Amino acid sequence: MTDHLRSQLLGYLLGALEEDEETILDEQLERDARLRRKLKQVWRSLRPLRSSPRDFVPPRGLAARTCKMIACFDRGQVVPEPALQSLAPVLAPPVPAVASRTDAAMTPTVAPAGVPSKWTWADVSVALSIAAAAFLLVLPAIENSRFNSRVAACQENLRQVGVALTQFSDRNNGYFPQIPRSGPAAVAGVYAPTLLENGYLDSSTRVVCPGSSLADDGEYAVPTLEQLRKANLVEELAKLHRQMGGSYGYTLGYLVDGTYRPTKNLRRPRFALMADSPNYDLPQLVSLNHGGQGQNILFEDGHVEFLAIPQRAALGDDFFTNDTGLVAAGLHRDDSVVGSSASAPMRTHGSGPR
């Protein structure tokens, strides 16, 4: 794998590509199975970054203290002892509170007035190392803060859509929006135009996760049901299917004796109703909305959780596949399956997910 290809795939996973680059790569991934395997390799290589058990927060004021220390070096001054002590958690070994006679003898003296200080390459190297250490400590904290804010905004979107779904069910005999068994609207994303066109949602932005690539598209709008009916070309209809549900997936319903049934609102606390849209090219179908680190899941009782993997280990349920491992309608009432916008409820082993 070339460095350029690896950087492209890495940027794709992190949502850092330009919109046109991402569109081109999406089309290539859809056609090229070998490229999809390379994407999985890059995704696995990021696993150590996703498995960190805790976040590392830099000491407060570290950057300011580091800059002050570097400024002292630049002027040829002795670095104040408190400044060194404040950097002790970062620099190793720790600086003792009281310097010994030997330490004092080795301490650099203040340059005479009017004599410019002369930096050696060693001085520059030390300064750059300190600055780099401070940068590496501060940057993860900034990125972590951005990540958490996007997760929180995504959860708020899902909660609002959950309220709309509950209102819809209250006025439709307890049932959530049904996915037709056939026709141009027979995919999971139909929930979005159904809620919008019936006044349960006020904007298409509610179905856009702030952590997804779709968030950069300022002109995005949920396609209407009329647009679906009027789509002439297969390619045009397929594009509308992918766009219809925004950044989120929706429940695919379930089967009873081979008969398809829509999901009824039983207000179950552990039944997945919606989630960040799964990605069918990645292991465990994890969503790309949050860099592959996990997905927000809206449960039927209205609460939202962020889960690293779309599985409920205690009950052996996977929220993105049914009990036989297919992206298709559940095999019973409690078999929760959330499909991406273009996923249809009725699947066979040979058809695979869209």
Image (tube, rainbow, N blue to C red):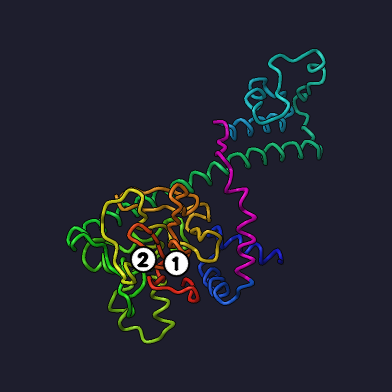
* Residue 37 quadrant: bottom right
Residue 257 left/right relative to 67: left
The residue lying at 26 percent from left, 54 percent from top is: 266
The residue lying at 57 percent from left, 74 percent from top is: 28
Q: Earlier in the sequence, mark 2 or mark 1?
A: 2
Q: Residue furthest bottom?
A: 232
The residue lying at 32 percent from left, 64 percent from top is: 204
Q: Nearer the viewer, residue 124 or 99?
A: 99
Please provide percent x and percent y for residue 47.
61, 51
Which residue position holds label 2? 252
The residue lying at 60 percent from left, 69 percent from top is: 36
Q: Secondary structure at mark 1?
A: loop
Does residue 84 appear anywhere in the picture?
yes
Please provide percent x and percent y for residue 256.
31, 67
Please provide percent x and percent y for residue 119.
79, 36
Report crowding for label 1: few under 14, some 14 to 19, many 20 or more residues within 10 A (C-alpha): many
Q: Is residue 86 above or below residue 177?
A: above
Q: Amino acid at mark 1?
A: Val
Report crowding for label 2: few under 14, some 14 to 19, many 20 or more residues within 10 A (C-alpha): many
- Mark 2 and mark 1 residues within 8 Å of each other at the beta carbon: yes
* Residue 11 quadrant: bottom right
Does residue 216 appear anywhere in the picture?
no
Q: Nearer the viewer, residue 190 or 262?
A: 262
Which residue position holds label 1? 327
Task: Give the magenta range.
Answer: 35-60
Q: Nearer the viewer, residue 142 or 54?
A: 54
Residue 140 left/right relative to 241: right
Q: Is residue 233 above or below residue 217?
A: below
